[in-house]
Amino acid sequence: MKILFLNHNVKGRGTYVRCFNFAKHLAEFGHAVSLLTSTSEYRLTLKREVIDGVEVISLPDILGNRLRNGGLGPIDSFLRCMFVLNRQYDIVEMFDHRPAVLFPGLVSKYIQKKQMVVEWTDLHGTGGSLGNRPPRLQKLIRHYENFTERKSKLLGDQLVVISQGLKKLALNMGIPAHRISWIPGGADVDNIKPHNKTDAREKFGLPLNQKLVGYTGYSHYDMDMLLKAINILQQSRDDVWFVKTGAVLSDSLKAHLHDPKRLIELGFLSYPVFTKILPAMDAFIFPYADKTINTGRWPNKLGDYMAAGRPTVTNRTGDIVDAFTKNNIGFMAAEDPEDMANKMQILLSNDELAEQMGRNARKAAEEIYDWRILSKKLESIFLNVSRPEVVGK
């Protein structure tokens, strides 16, 4: 099949990770896959790359990075529509509903009459990421965000949801259960491996004989709780270091730490470096409070942690409850810094337990959450919604 993925994020960020991992495995299965994404830099020309067999295309755009990453560029949206009109695909998949995805998706469905699958990967409107935006912006875009988010999910021949929370919302919207498929986030078991801790630390100059607690994050959700937990850990143990990749913490957030000198911020790393840093950790921690923004998504970082073969401390929220309960990959704490610190203390004080949970995590990554396995599920969906003559190809 010839497949087109429509993604609104810039290369390497947000939903692009999910799109690309599906795309590269579908290409491995023998399909021709194009991924249309937003440009990661100011561009006046089309950029085309072939990465792991996937045609990755970004069109010109002159807006700032924040607008490009949000899929809000009118030039990008228009050029994508023109691009779709001049290409022939057997099936198109829309990832979420931002203009850079929605408008070319509408062109594909109603002008070109193509089969379509729609993905719901995050709750963006009321109760979701909208609540993290400035109040004036919330007021300005609330109705548009809610309307397009809900209505776009009715466009597909099949709806793929990343969480059971989104599946419930889809059912409440009247979408029949047989038209909804659940595919959680995956684990990149090919590139992220549970290498030796000491080797990884020596390679990147990290403390060798200390306890390293890792966290990866591009957006700060519930960080007060996490940093207060690290504060408690650092007070009880002088060998605990907090290692963070992604967005740098503000001074006000750093103030929650007991010893900011035992904070290592690595910033945004290239993917090859990121995959090699993860095994340097003793354990991972991330806050995941029980609220709609979290029940309406899947934390991609969990797949990374599992693939690295390290245990995790988090909260009892959404789909990860099932993942932790069935696979014994770490601890779920109450939404309380002290309980999170206590659960992490158990892991850091018991190497045998931490190693066993890490092995469990890697096994779950390989047998359940491997992107290759999840991509097979997506391939089956495509075959089921495709026209008969396409299925036979």
Image (cartoon, rainbow, N blue to C red):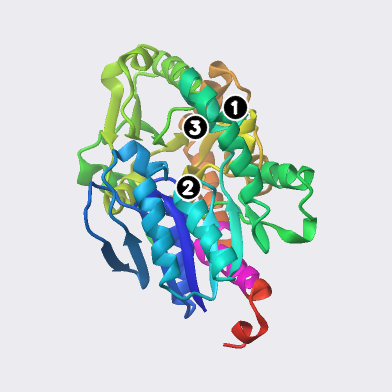
Judged from this view, the residue extending furthest toward the front is 111
Position of the C terminus by quadrant:
bottom right
List x then y, in percent, for residue 392: 62, 88
Task: Magenta stretch: give its range.
Answer: 368-382
Q: Of callouts 2 and 3, which one flags the residue occurring earlier in the amino acid sequence?
A: 2
Which numbered tag is attached to residue 193?
none
> Could you tell me which secondary element the residue under label 2 belongs to?
helix
Q: CA distance from mark 3 to mark 1?
A: 10 Å
Q: Residues within 10 Å of mark 2 (few under 14, many from 20)?
A: some
Q: Which residue is mark 3?
A: 286
* In this rendering, the label closer to the viewer, 2 or 3: 2
Secondary structure character of the magenta stretch overall: helix
Please state which of residues 5 and 286 is positioned toward the viewer in this rendering. Answer: 5
* In this rendering, the label closer to the viewer, 1 or 2: 2
Which numbered tag is attached to residue 99?
2
The residue at the point 49 percent across, 27 percent down is 221
Q: Amino acid at mark 3?
A: Phe
Find out whether residue 311 is within the magenta segment.
Answer: no
Q: Is residue 247 above or below residue 341?
A: below
Q: Residues within 10 Å of mark 1 (few under 14, many from 20)?
A: many
Q: CA distance from mark 1 to mark 2?
A: 30 Å
Q: Is residue 353 above or below residue 273?
A: above
State left or right for residue 319 relative to residue 136. right
Q: Which residue is mark 1?
A: 289
List x then y, in percent, for residue 78: 40, 54
Regarding residue 133, the answer to whether it shows in the image is yes
Residues marked 2 and 3 touching at CB (< 8 Å): no
List x then y, in percent, for residue 327: 63, 49
